[in-house]
Amino acid sequence: MRLNRRLAIVALASACIFAAAPASGQQYPSQPIKIIVSLAPGGVADIVARIFANKMGEAGKTVIVENRTGGSGIIGADAVAKSQADGYTLYMGFHGTQSILPHLMAKLPYDATKDFLPVIFIATSPDILIVHPSIPAKTPAELVAYVKANPGKVTYASPGVGSSGHVAAEQFKQLHGLDITPVHYRGAAPALQDVVAGHASMMFDIVPLTKEQLAAGKVRALAITSKQRGAAVPDVPTMVEAGMPEVQGGPWFGLFAPAGTPRPVIAWINAEANRVFSLPDVRERLTGQGLTLPLGSPEDFGKHVDEETKRWGEVIRRANIKLE
């Protein structure tokens, strides 16, 4: 009798503790959810955030997208890191703020590892290695041979210091001991324009931005940095097929929550995002733009972030890249 009474007291106490939590799987969400996007409107981070918000609206939930740009994404990331951990402020994080900037800057206002919890890996796009048609190489191996035969004469266009295209090109250089000169631009669009014009020899770009120029024959694609071929460019081989499996990477985007957010809330958001980004119309729209939708569990996303942070940290250290 006493044992049953004690068990009842413990059960009641547990229920009270759960009810007193900032948010629970059963109570959540009871107010609008805000997703902070630290990149400009119209980009991949903004697009996927608004798709999620719209689909959640169709399901009767209110999700607001707020663009808080500046500082290469630092301002938006820091705002979420310092938000209340109740699940009502989320961050559409990306490779820059979570895996690259921590290696480029001596001091960030947030800790990318400790201040966030991964929720779901939404989208990624492999980098695609392109060259100007004047470069005779048709494969990555032929490009390596050409560069070695012409040391110091080949340039690569970088979308900016610390960008996905920058670190991917440095990774390629390091793996093959190449003498290629970087030319940095303020964004991918002007960098691609100069490759098209022949002012730069090559570039690691993303598929959605390169498709039109590829179709017009203004650049030549040698390989993409993914393990499988991309649906948007099915004729372009992977780096694995090219015999260079170490050359991997590309921009990625996913939801994060402030550290301390209750596990039931993380699970609820993860389940809803898996549902939304598995809808046929959503998948068709995004994969048609050259994106891959990994989805999966928070643990899957956390593993990916850890691997990316380690990979680019090593590349940045060896290249002695610094953000000035």
Image: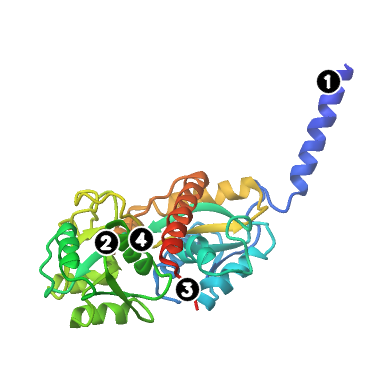
Q: Are marks 1 and 4 in contact (CB under 8 Å)?
A: no
213 or 11, which is in the foreground? 213
Query: Hey, what amino acid is under mark 4?
Result: Gly
Q: Nearer the viewer, mark 3 or mark 4?
A: 4
In the image, taking residue 83 as reference, residue 172 lies left or right, namely left
Q: Quadrant of residue 51?
A: bottom left
Residue found at x 67% / y 50%: 27
* Mark 1 crowdedness (10 Å alpha carbons): few <14, some 14-19, many ≥20: few
Mark linked to residue 250 = 4
Residue 110, position as x, y percentages in the image: 63, 65
List the residue tagged with mark 1. 4
Mark linked to residue 84 = none
Q: Quadrant of the N terminus?
A: top right
Query: Hey, what amino acid is under mark 2?
Result: Gly
List the residue tagged with mark 2. 288
- Dot 3 falls on a residue whose secondary structure is loop
Q: Earlier in the sequence, mark 2 or mark 4?
A: 4
- Dot 1 falls on a residue whose secondary structure is helix
Mark linked to residue 39 = 3
Q: How many marks?
A: 4
| Marks 1/4: CA–CA distance | 57 Å
166 or 298, which is in the foreground? 166
Query: Hey, what amino acid is under mark 3?
Result: Leu
Q: Nearer the viewer, mark 1 or mark 4?
A: 4
Q: Earlier in the sequence, mark 3 or mark 4?
A: 3
